[in-house]
Amino acid sequence: MKKIISALTLAIAFAGSALAQDDLGTANLVVHTGDGQSVEYSFSVEPVVTFEGNDLVLTDIDETRVVYPMSEGVSFTFTNISTGISNTKVTPSLSVRLVNGIVTVAGLEPNAPVMVYDLAGRRVATAAADPTGSAVVNTQGWNAGAYVFTAKGQSFKIIK
């Protein structure tokens, strides 16, 4: 009962501020309780969500607090979050794996070059990405030391 009263108090406290939202919209926090219930809070400013001991604590700008015991299976999600960033382009990142002297670089465009340099700046190897966007460089037999790999405008170092 105390949780329900606290939840209603917090919802009423935020009702006025939710009406005064800006162009970015209202963020919603949904708390899922262990008994299958969900309580949704709307904030025109981001709430502060903290953990105190084993409790989830919600605090608004007016320092109104609601406490949910995590031991009762409480979880939460945010919805309707606006970052103010639009028209973004997702660029896949590179993935690098070194196993038994074989370096595999994934996340490339097909035929994209991978260049390998020693610390003196000499190019010691090149590879091209296959149709799936992966390039393989065999470093077995190379001298011990550091090597700089460049691909897709990024550089990374492998120490052998």
Image: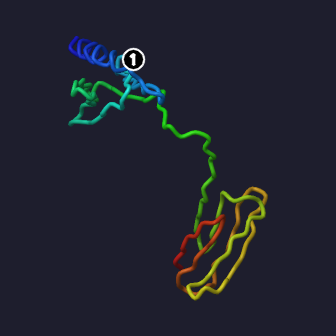
Give the vertical position of 78 relative to 113 (above or below).
Answer: above
Which x, y percent locates residue 135? 70, 66
Q: Residue at x 59, y 72 (%)?
A: 100
Crowding near the residue tagged with mark 1, few <14, some 14–19, many ≥20 C-alpha atoms within 10 Å: few
Question: Element under label 1?
Answer: helix
The amino acid type found where label 1 is placed reads: Leu
Position of the N terminus by quadrant? top left
In the picture, measured across the screen, residue 141 lies left or right of residue 16, that is right
In the picture, measured across the screen, residue 79 lies left or right of residue 71, that is right
Q: Residue at x 57, y 79 (%)?
A: 147
Number of marks in picture: 1
Give the vertical position of 122 relative to 61 (above or below).
Answer: below
Which x, y percent locates residue 149? 61, 73
In the picture, measured across the screen, residue 113 lies left or right of residue 65, that is right
Give the vertical position of 22 relative to 106 (above or below).
Answer: above
Q: Quadrant of residue 103?
A: bottom right
Q: Quadrant of residue 53?
A: top left
The one nearer the camera, 41 or 18, is: 18
What is the basis of the colouring in this image?
A: rainbow
Residue with the mark numbered 1: 19
Q: Quadrant of residue 123?
A: bottom right
Which x, y percent locates residue 42? 39, 21
Give the vertical position of 83 relative to 32 (above or below).
Answer: below
Which x, y percent locates residue 62? 23, 26
The one nearer the camera, 46 or 29, is: 46
Q: Residue at x 34, y 15 (%)?
A: 15
In the picture, measured across the screen, residue 37 lies left or right of residue 150, that is left
The one nearer the camera, 36 or 115, is: 115
Q: Residue at x 53, y 84 (%)?
A: 145
The one nearer the camera, 51 or 160, is: 51
